[in-house]
Image: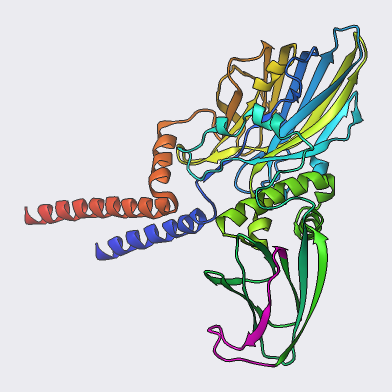
């Protein structure tokens, strides 16, 4: 009986170990963001949308991040009922980051001819790692979106775009194989001077006394940009991190340049940002975003900003709006198309396997004179081929294809949820609840429960056997 008990325990441990390793491979919740229909910049556009064909194609999911992604194609049949030519400015808003913006993945067409568009950078949207916090309505405020479609320069509190500053370019070179801790000390009054640094990773300050430093293993080029009253740079170097062991085994050279703030910011950002498509964004938009960030950090940090503060902007999820113009002849029709990639919200807190929810914001359609005949098609992926929840009725055409036809817009924005099984069972919900409560520890908890149950069974068997022997 002891051998049997040992075998059962060993088997339970062997079977639970792979599950524990797998659980650490990814999260139980990953937020996606809604996609949207196109909108008219004008609130009272005379243009009618006579039909929209909307296709969600997840058959080529690239398995990016921890959720399902796919291609969305929206095709609009539009009509100008007036006797005048109409030059209509349209906008397509979406949520993304500057460093991951890929212009080639978004195609806008007019009668199958590809249109050029301008990119406008909006505000940061809310991002969550907890399904209880998600509120998509905070992400899509269309008045705010239209408000970002402007070429006006940002009006700052602490500077003007044409204000000139002094750029210090500092070339540092250790003269031995030993690394050096390169240090610059300076004093500044934040009411009179604003400082932006580049290349330093240590910052200390006490009142007006300021120290910035960086370890140099090889030649480095560092920068200090000063607006307002100039500062006096005091250079030194050390071999330790406590600034006690001074060294002279280094050389440095300082070059200075007078340059306008706007020119400096644009040049700096475009040379340091990770996006391959930064050239698609106008200098005015780049300046507005980073000037606003610079302005806010100057207030927050009392006149001092590092490049880390500014460059972090490229990683934030924010509203990006593509603006283009379509020319309508009098009493004429146009076919406008938009295709792009989208990703859903993955949630394993409710079910054993992940739920993938996609949202499509329809309320900007109210800006058009009329909007009718919405035809929707979903080509589902292999790992989640079933629509298990939605706010509209779907027709299952088999072969992972769902369709819906609406004569008018639904009362609420469209959403649908994909799942691996056709129905969500009670066992699915129980497993999801465990994942919600214990997260990565769920397999361990299940393993312990299994061991306890097997132990209980063994104890019952032993008890019965002992009882039979006594009889």
158 in relation to 432, above or below: below
Say whether residue 238 is magenta.
yes
Looking at the rendering, which quadrant does residue 95 occupy?
top right
**Is 57 or 108 nearer to us in this picture?**
108
Magenta stretch, overall SS: loop
236 in relation to 433, above or below: below
**Is 121 or 432 nearer to us in this picture?**
121
Q: Residue at x 68, y 62 (%)?
A: 307
Q: Could you tell whether 41 is left or right of 388 in the image?
A: right
120 in relation to 236, above or below: above
Q: Farthest residue in the left direction?
A: 471
Find residue 58 and report its horizontal and vertical position in percent.
70, 35
Q: Residue at x 40, y 32 (%)?
A: 426
Q: Quadrant of the N terminus?
A: bottom left
Q: Could you tell whether 302 is left or right of 193 in the image?
A: left
Find residue 107 and report its horizontal and vertical position in percent.
83, 35
Find residue 240 and report its horizontal and vertical position in percent.
57, 87
Looking at the rendering, which quadrant does residue 319 occupy?
top right
The mark total stands at 0
Q: Could you tell whether 261 is left or right of 203 in the image?
A: right
Looking at the rendering, which quadrant does residue 3 occupy?
bottom left
Find residue 438 and report its horizontal and vertical position in percent.
39, 49
Q: Residue at x 67, y 56 (%)?
A: 310
Tell me if residue 429 can be seen.
yes
Tell me if residue 277 can be seen.
no
Say whether residue 398 is magenta.
no
154 in relation to 194, above or below: above
Q: Could you tell whether 164 is left or right of 110 in the image?
A: left
Tell me how the rendering is colored: rainbow
Magenta residues? 226-248
């Amino acid at each position: 009986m002891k051998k049997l008990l040992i075998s059962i325990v060993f088997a339970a441990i062997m079977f639970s170990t792979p599950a524990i390793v797998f659980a650490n491979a990814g999260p139980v919740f990953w937020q996606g963001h809604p996609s949207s229909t196109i909108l008219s910049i004008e609130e009272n556009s005379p243009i009618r949308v006579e039909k929209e064909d909307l296709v969600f194609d997840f058959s080529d999911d690239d398995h990016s991040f921890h959720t399902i992604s796919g291609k969305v194609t929206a095709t609009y049949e539009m009509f100008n009922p007036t006797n005048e030519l109409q030059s209509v400015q349209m906008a397509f808003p979406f949520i993304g980051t500057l460093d991951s913006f890929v212009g080639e993945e978004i195609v806008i067409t007019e009668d199958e001819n590809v249109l050029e568009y301008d990119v406008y950078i909006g505000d940061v949207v809310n991002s969550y790692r907890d399904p209880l916090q998600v509120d998509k309505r905070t992400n899509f405020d269309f008045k705010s979106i239209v408000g970002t479609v402007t070429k006006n320069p940002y009006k700052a509190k602490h500077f003007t775009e044409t204000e000139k500053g002094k750029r210090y370019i500092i070339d540092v070179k250790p003269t031995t194989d030993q690394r050096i801790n390169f240090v610059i000390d300076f004093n500044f009054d934040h009411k009179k001077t604003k400082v932006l640094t580049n290349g330093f990773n240590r910052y200390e300050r006490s009142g007006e006394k300021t120290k910035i430093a960086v370890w140099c293993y090889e030649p480095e080029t560092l920068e200090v940009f000063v607006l307002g009253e100039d500062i006096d740079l005091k250079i030194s170097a050390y071999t330790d991190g406590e600034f006690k062991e001074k060294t002279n085994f280094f050389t440095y050279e300082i070059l200075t340049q007078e340059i306008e703030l706007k020119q400096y910011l644009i040049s700096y950002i475009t040379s340091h940002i990770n996006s391959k498509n930064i050239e698609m964004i106008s200098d005015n938009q780049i300046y507005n975003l980073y000037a606003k960030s610079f302005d806010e950090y100057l207030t927050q940090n009392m006149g001092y900003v590092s490049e880390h503060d500014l460059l972090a902007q490229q990683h934030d999820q924010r509203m990006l709006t593509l603006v283009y113009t379509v020319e309508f002849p009098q009493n004429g029709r146009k076919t406008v198309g938009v295709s792009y990639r989208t990703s859903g919200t993955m949630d394993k807190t409710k079910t054993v396997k992940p739920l993938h929810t996609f949202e499509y914001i329809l309320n900007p359609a109210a800006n058009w004179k009329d909007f009718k005949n919405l035809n929707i098609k979903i080509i589902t992926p292999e790992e989640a081929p079933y629509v298990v929840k939605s706010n509209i009725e779907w027709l299952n055409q088999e072969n992972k294809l769902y369709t819906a036809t609406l004569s008018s817009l639904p009362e609420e924005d469209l959403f649908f949820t994909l799942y691996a099984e056709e129905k969500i069972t009670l066992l699915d919900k129980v497993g999801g609840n465990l994942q919600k409560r214990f997260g990565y520890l769920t397999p361990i908890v299940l393993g312990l429960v299994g061991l306890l149950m097997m132990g209980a069974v063994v104890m019952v068997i032993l008890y019965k056997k002992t009882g039979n022997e006594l009889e």
